[in-house]
Amino acid sequence: MSFQAKRVVKKVISWAGLFFFAVAAYMLYNQLSKYSIADIKNAVFSIPAKNLWLACGASFLGYVALSSYDYLALRYIGRKLAAWKWIFAGIIGFSVSNNAGHAIVSGGTIRYRLYTRWRFRGTEIVRMVTFSGFTYLIACFFLIIVGYFITPNHAFGAGSVSKLTTEITTLLSFVGLLGYFGLSIWYKKPLRIKDIELDMPRFKMALAQMIIGAADIIMDSFVLYFSLIPFVEIPFETFMGVFIIAKVLGVFSQVPGGLGVFEGLFMYIIPGEHNQAMLFGALLAYRIMYYLLPLVFSAVVLFSYEGYLKYVKRQKLEKIKLFRLQEVAAQEKAG
C-alpha cells in the first residue's frame, strides 16, 4: 500500500470514530424516543433522591473500571501514558460502544482517533483493543459461572432444553476461563497476524483482566439495583444472578445496549410478582444513568477536546506565520 493510500485509510478510520459517536447517539435516541417526557420524568423522580445519587455514583465508578481496561492494555503492550489520557479514552470509548454495540469496531475507532494523536502506532492500538475484548470475554465467562449458581432455579426454564442450554453455556464458560488461565501459564509463543504480534498475557495479567472486568459489570449492576430496591424487595445475591444472566445474554445478542433483550430477560427471570410499571420505571432510569448521561458527558468532553486541539493548532500556525514574517522583515532590513 502506498504512503498516500495509508494516509487516506488512517484518516477514514480516525473520522469513523466520530461517525460511531453519532451512531451511538442515534441508537440511544431511538431507545428513548418511544417514551414521552412525562414517562421519563415519572420513571426517574419516582426513585428516592438518595438512590438516584447512589446509582449515579455507581455509574461513574463503573466507567472508571471500564477505563481501567485501557490501563491494563497499555501495560500489555508495554507503553506508558498519563492517567487522564487513558481514563479519557476509556470512558469515551465505552460510552460509545455501550450504546452503538459492536464494541471492537465502534469503541476501537474512537481509540484510534485519540491514541494516534498521542503517538501510538496502528498495530499497538489493534493489540490494545484485542486485549480489551478478551478482558470483557473472560469477565463474562467468570460471571456466567457465578450467575448460574446464584440465579433462581426457575430462571433456567421448566423445560429440559432451556435448562440443558444454560448448563452447556455455563460449562463452556468454565472451559473457556480454565483454558485462558491455562494458556497464560504454559503458552509462550506469540501469535502473528501480518504485522501484528499478539502475546498471551501472563497469569497475573489474566487474573487482573478477570477482576477488573467483573468489577465493571458489578458496578453496572449497582446502577439498576439502587434504582430497583425502592420498589422490589430482593436479596442482592439473587438480583446479581438475574442481572448477570440478562446482561451477558444481552451483550452477546449484539443488539446495541442489549435493548429489549436485557429488559425482557430481566423481567422474566426476576423472582416474585412485582408492579410492572415500577419495574419498567427502574429499568428506564437505569438506561438514562448508565447509557444516556455518560454519552452526553462524553460528547461534551470529546468535542471540547477537539475544539481545544484545533485552537492549539491554529495558535501554532499563527506563531509560525509571525516568525516567518519576522524573518522576512529581518532579511529585507539586512539587505
Image (tube, rainbow, N blue to C red):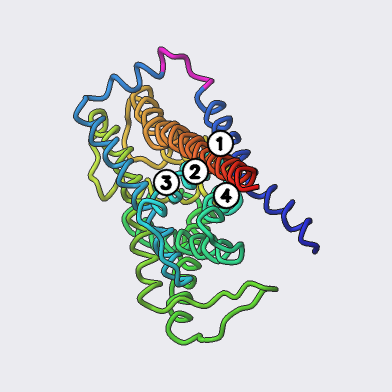
SS at badge 2:
helix
* Residue occupied by mark 4: 113
Badge 1 amino acid: Ala
In the rendered image of this protein, does residue 199 appear above or below residue 299?
Answer: below
Q: Which mark is residue 98?
A: 2
Q: Are marks 1 and 2 in contact (CB under 8 Å)?
A: yes
Earlier in the chain: of badge 2 and badge 3, it is 3
Dot 3 or dot 1, earlier in sequence: 1
Disc 1 from disc 4: Cα separation: 16 Å
For the N terminus, the image quarter is bottom right
Q: Is residue 253 left or right of residue 277?
A: right
Q: Residues within 10 Å of mark 3 (few under 14, many from 20)?
A: many
For residue 91, the mark is: 3
Please name the amino acid that badge 4 sits on.
Arg
Q: Are marks 2 and 4 in contact (CB under 8 Å)?
A: no
Amino acid type shown at disc 3: Ile
Q: Residue at x 57, y 81 (%)?
A: 190
What number is the disc on residue 276? none
- Residue bounds of the magenta highlight: 33-39
Residue 263 in view: no
Secondary structure at badge 4 equals helix
Q: Position of residue 237 (x, y in %)?
A: 26, 50
